[in-house]
Image (cartoon, rainbow, N blue to C red):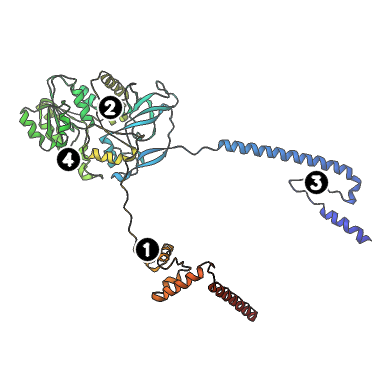
Amino acid sequence: MTETTEAPVAAQTAETKTPSPTTETAVVTPAENGHADEKSAAAVVATEATEEQQATNGGATADEKAKAEEKKEDPPKEMRAVVLTGFGGFKNVKILKKPEPSPQAGEVLIRVKACGLNFQDLMVRLGAIDSPPKTPTILGFECAGEIEAVGEEVEGFKVGDRVVALPEFRAWSELVAVPTKYCYHIPEEMTYQDAAAIVMNYLVAYILIFDLVSLREGKSLLLHSVGGGVGQAIVQLVRTVPNVTIFGVCSKQKHEALAATGLIDHLIDRTDYVNEVRKITTEGVDIVMDCLCGEECNRGYGLLKPMGKYILYGSSNVVTGETKSFFSVARSWWQVDKVSPIKLFEENKSLAGFNLRHLLYQQDGSEYVRSTVDKIFGLWKDGKIKPVVDSAWALEDVAEAMQKMHDRKNIGKLVLDPSLEPKPKPATPAKSKSKKQASEDKGGKKEKDDEKKGGENGEEKKEGEDGAAASGGEEAKTNGATDGEAAAPAQVNGDDGGEKKEQAATNGEATESEKKESS
């Protein structure tokens, strides 16, 4: 009896274990029956406390989850941009997805509608400028669009303003953040393409003509690359001064189109322009505007009259191929004669140079540039100048646009428009099969060959790769026919069907007997 009565107690005692962390309960044994009421009450209180704690913890977890979800940042928005992945050929200019920028203090975020293409961009691609940027980098110095966001400490600009900007790189993208000192409001009537075509080109032309040269009536001027964007801007600004003779130098293929404008007095082929100018005027010219550099510096300087002025504002002769050539750079500069101040003093000639990029970004000429842009827009409103746009291109076609400028085939400005669809690419010809594929097809290892053989052998189906490859000639045909009969559904009527059933039964009996023997 003692063992019988103690066994349940021991079992109950064994069951009295530490409650699980999730649920606290009190187990009352017979030995503790005297204090059962007190412990039961304590257990109820403990259970309620535990449930309350669990509810509290559960609520905190839900709050934390909610906060975590709120803190979850959306994936960064992306934009298309023309990215230079390395210096060299056109293959390094690619359209990539980049994170959308945010305007910092003193900046505005511009939704780009049009971008300007300049010869300076070709030099950047080659790495042929001083202090080239680190790659990868977004290309472009000129864009026009609408302000989409404004950073702190910005005055004079607001969301929705139509502007044109001259950032140092990053202009060829769908969005660009630009400091306000490089942004300019454009007239309401001006299109975005015209804005992208007018600012940089006419800014350079205006400073050359009216600030460096101080062009006056009755002067003569020799202008290289007269068909380019800056060349056309110079011609139009020169025509605001009466009785000025323009000698325009360019490739012969552009002469007919430029002659139709009636703005250029003498169009001369660039191959032998020195002798052509001497035939027209033995005295020479008053002004030479050179954007080529190299040996053209010496030729141009030799054409100057006494009191003449030579202006260098570019070095496009450095760009001779798709990749950077240190030889072409060195040759371009070593071809220039060293002119001392004494020689200038003796010959009564002047030399001057102009680099807008240095003036704007390195020499803090932003206020001077802004006042000049205002004058240019005033001339545009008065109808005295009108930008010439050669063509507009999609961002995806930027390499083709750069090639056209590289070949000097454009007349006027080349513009990139992010909203344009790219030109359709030629279809890629179908690739011929490799030898390996041909051998596999011949050996019958591909499923496609089964379908072809099915048409010849009465819709045969291959059950394995060994059949057709291991057999040939009449044996392959016989096996193929046998396989075809075996694979066909049992839809044959008459004796054939009976024979198949008997064969199946025979096979079945044989199988059973074999099983018995093996067992």
Which residue carries the number 1 mark? 437
Q: Is residue 47 visible?
A: yes
Figure disc tally: 4
* Front of the two marks 3 and 4: 3
Sequence-first disc among 3 and 4: 3
* Front of the two marks 4 and 2: 2
- Separation (CA) of disc 1 from disc 2: 58 Å
Sequence-first disc among 3 and 1: 3
Circle 3/circle 4 CB separation < 8 Å: no
31 lies left or right of 162: right
Which residue carries the number 4 mark? 334
x and y percentages locating residue 497 in the rendered image: 55, 72
Which element type, helix, strand or loop, lies under badge 1? Answer: helix
Which residue carries the number 2 mark? 198
Q: Which residue extends farthest bottom? A: 517
Please state which amino acid type lies under the numbered disc 4: Trp
Could you tell me which quadrant the N terminus lies in? bottom right
x and y percentages locating residue 405 in the rendered image: 24, 37
* Front of the two marks 3 and 1: 1
x and y percentages locating residue 353 in the rendered image: 21, 30
Q: Which mark is residue 25?
A: 3
Q: Is residue 337 visible?
A: no
Of residues 297 and 256, the one nearer the viewer is 256
x and y percentages locating residue 333 in the rendered image: 19, 39
Sequence-first disc among 4 and 1: 4
Above or below — where is 389 with respect to 456?
Answer: above
Q: Residues within 10 Å of mark 3 (few under 14, many from 20)?
A: some
Which element type, helix, strand or loop, lies under badge 2? Answer: helix
Of residues 356 and 81, the one nearer the viewer is 81
- Separation (CA) of disc 3 from disc 4: 97 Å
Please state which amino acid type lies under the numbered disc 3: Thr
